[in-house]
Image: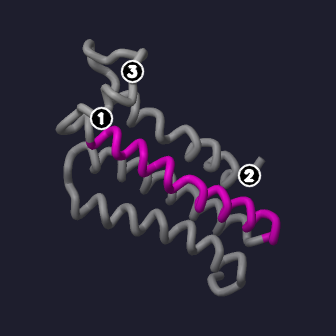
Amino acid sequence: MTTAYWCVLLAALLPYPWVLAAKAHPRYSNRSPREYLAQQTGWRQRAHWAHLNTLEAFPLFAAAVIIAHQLHAPQPALDRLAMAFIGLRLAYGLVYIADIAWLRSLLWFAAIGCSVAMFLLTAGVLH
């Protein structure tokens, strides 16, 4: 299995540390988790939002990796882009929780750029 495919697995799991952080509180009730999360403020609320955004970013990334593999994109470049995506999304979640909005937006654009670059790599636009 390629590094890029392993990164798909990591990206699929990446939302869960953020939601676990949001839920890690004695008042958390598994009987009504959505109600609990809707009432959060501060860093716990931002951790929940990082969870949701990380879930939203996954489909484009997974599709980019799978399509790039199917169309035989250059593997070393694809692996580098996939690893960059994971690193950027990890930093994104941490910066989101820390409430550094300008850096969060920069990291979001860079990670989406990695997914778009995979399509461009596959199309032969990037080398």
Q: What secondary structure characterizes most of the magenta part?
A: helix
Q: Helix, strand or loop at disc 1?
A: helix
Instruction: Check residue 2 in the rendering and tell me which mark sits there, or answer none.
Output: 2
Give the amino acid type for the residue marked by disc 3 in the picture. Ser
How many C-alpha atoms fall within 10 Å of the one at disc 3: few (<14), some, or many (≥20)? few
Real-space Cα separation, disc 3 to disc 1, in angstroms: 10 Å
Which of marks 2 and 1 precedes in the sequence? 2
Q: Position of residue 92 (x, y in %)?
A: 36, 52
Q: Nearer the viewer, residue 56 or 32?
A: 32
Magenta residue check for 86 = no
Judge from the rendering whether residue 60 lies leftward or rightward of residue 38; answer left or right. Answer: right
Real-space Cα separation, disc 3 to disc 2, in angstroms: 39 Å
Q: Residue at x 81, y 71 (%)?
A: 71
Which of marks 1 and 3 precedes in the sequence? 3
Q: Nearer the viewer, residue 2 or 15?
A: 15
Residue placed furthest toward the bottom: 125
Residue 116 position (above or below residue 37): below
Q: Residue at x 26, y 12 (%)?
A: 26
Part of the protein shown in magenta:
46-72
Q: Residue at x 57, y 64 (%)?
A: 81
Residue under pointer 1: 38
Residue contact at pointers 3 and 1, CB within 8 angstroms: no
Instruction: Check residue 32 in the rendering and tell me which mark sits there, or answer none.
Output: 3
Give the amino acid type for the residue marked by disc 1 in the picture. Ala
Give the amino acid type for the residue marked by disc 2 in the picture. Thr
Q: Helix, strand or loop at disc 3?
A: loop
Rendering quarter of residue 126 = bottom right
